[in-house]
Amino acid sequence: MINIIAIQSILQSFVSDISDIQGATLVSPDGLAIASALPERVDEERIAAMTAAMLSIGERIGRELARGQIDRVIVVGEKGYSVLVNCSDDAVLLILANANAKQGLLFLEIKRAVAELVPLLAEQPKANLLT
Amino acid sequence: MEVLRIVITGAVGAGKTTLIRTISEIQVVDTDRQATDETALLKPTTTVAFDFGRLTFAPNQALHLYGTPGQARFDFIWDILIQKAHAYIFLVDAHRPQDFRSGRRILSFMNQRAKIPMLIGLTHMDCPGAWDLDDIALALGLFDEATRPAMVPINPTQPSSVSQALMRLVQELMKAPVLN
């Protein structure tokens, strides 16, 4: 079994401990939520689907334009950042941060969160993601 | 070069990606990912953004083909693609009546957003248990034979069948008043 409680708590403390981070969600590459710590008003199902679409387009652009393996996809708006990082073959992490977030710190924190999440995902055979 | 943007839509497993792969003259840009929901019972991978293919059919005319995802959670992609489309094909898997409902939802979604020429492509007509054309029309809520869109059987794996359907759609497009 995947340790969903541990994953959930990593996401939750990530969002609550770092002031400029507003939300985080871990989704499957085909756009289904695995675990989330998102603001109340957002629709988890929709965000999960958008995350998958965004990463797949980002990766495709990376491939077509010979940018190599895609590290992350970032959308910057006047109200903040959406950052997408590949966690493993089975999971993509989306982070929402407000416009005050310092980029360097943001990426460092995301890197740490990914490092915490990866072992929890890696132990699991793929079939366990089926719910 | 005149470009006509054609959207290929329909429920999961109707044959959208296959159709574009069959007819595209360029290597298809796809965004397939391993399926982990009920789609996995039907096929190993599923489109999560869109497929893109191209077909040049006259010296200065080309079709750009955009295939949508089938699952409703990707309806924001349906919206993006249909807004810019000149025409679309709605695919229905004739031997999976359990999908007609979700197909109907896609159809009404598209109808609300775009008043553009379209046709309904019926796939898997040769499979056992396939419904016939009139029954599918009724299942999709298209009760009036005179006003319903053109419905044609398509084999998405066969280039001649796909190009025939596309040419039919282009004809519909030529009949329609010019919009933009």
Image (spheres, coloured by chain):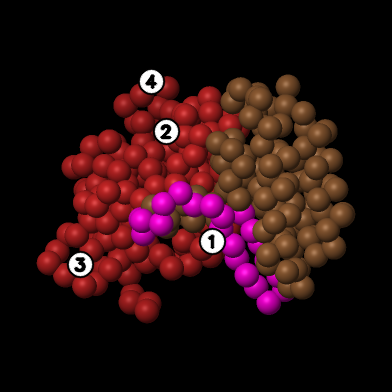
Q: Is residue A42 magenta?
A: no
Element on which disc 3 rests = strand
Which residue is rendered at x = 66% and y = 62% of the image? Answer: A82
Q: Nearer the viewer, residue B80 or A61?
A: A61
Q: Amino acid at mark 2?
A: Ala
For marks 1 and 2, the one nearer the N-term is: 1
Which callout, 1 or 4, points to the residue nearer the camera? 1
- On whether disc 1 and disc 4 are found on a single subunit, the reply is yes
Q: Position of residue B56 (x, y in %)?
A: 19, 60
Q: Residues within 10 Å of mark 1 (few under 14, many from 20)?
A: some
Q: Give the Cα distance between marks 1 and 2.
A: 25 Å
Circle number at residue B61: 3
Q: Chain of mark 4?
A: B
Circle number at residue A121: none
The answer to whether residue B40 is left or right of residue B123 is right
Q: Amino acid at mark 1?
A: Asp
Which callout, 1 or 2, points to the residue nearer the camera? 1
Circle number at residue B94: 2
Q: Label 1: which residue?
A: B79
- On whether disc 3 and disc 1 are found on a single subunit, the reply is yes
Question: In the rendered view of the protein, which quadrant contains the C terminus of chain B?
Answer: bottom left
Question: In the rendered view of the protein, which quadrant contains the N terminus of chain B?
Answer: bottom left
For marks 2 and 3, the one nearer the N-term is: 3
Which hue belongs to chain A?
A: brown
Which hue belongs to chain B?
A: red
Which residue is rendered at x = 38% and y = 43% of the image? Answer: B17
Element on which disc 1 rests = helix
Residue interval drawn in magenta: A64-84
Q: Position of residue B41 (x, y in %)?
A: 53, 25
The answer to whether residue B93 is left or right of residue A120 is left
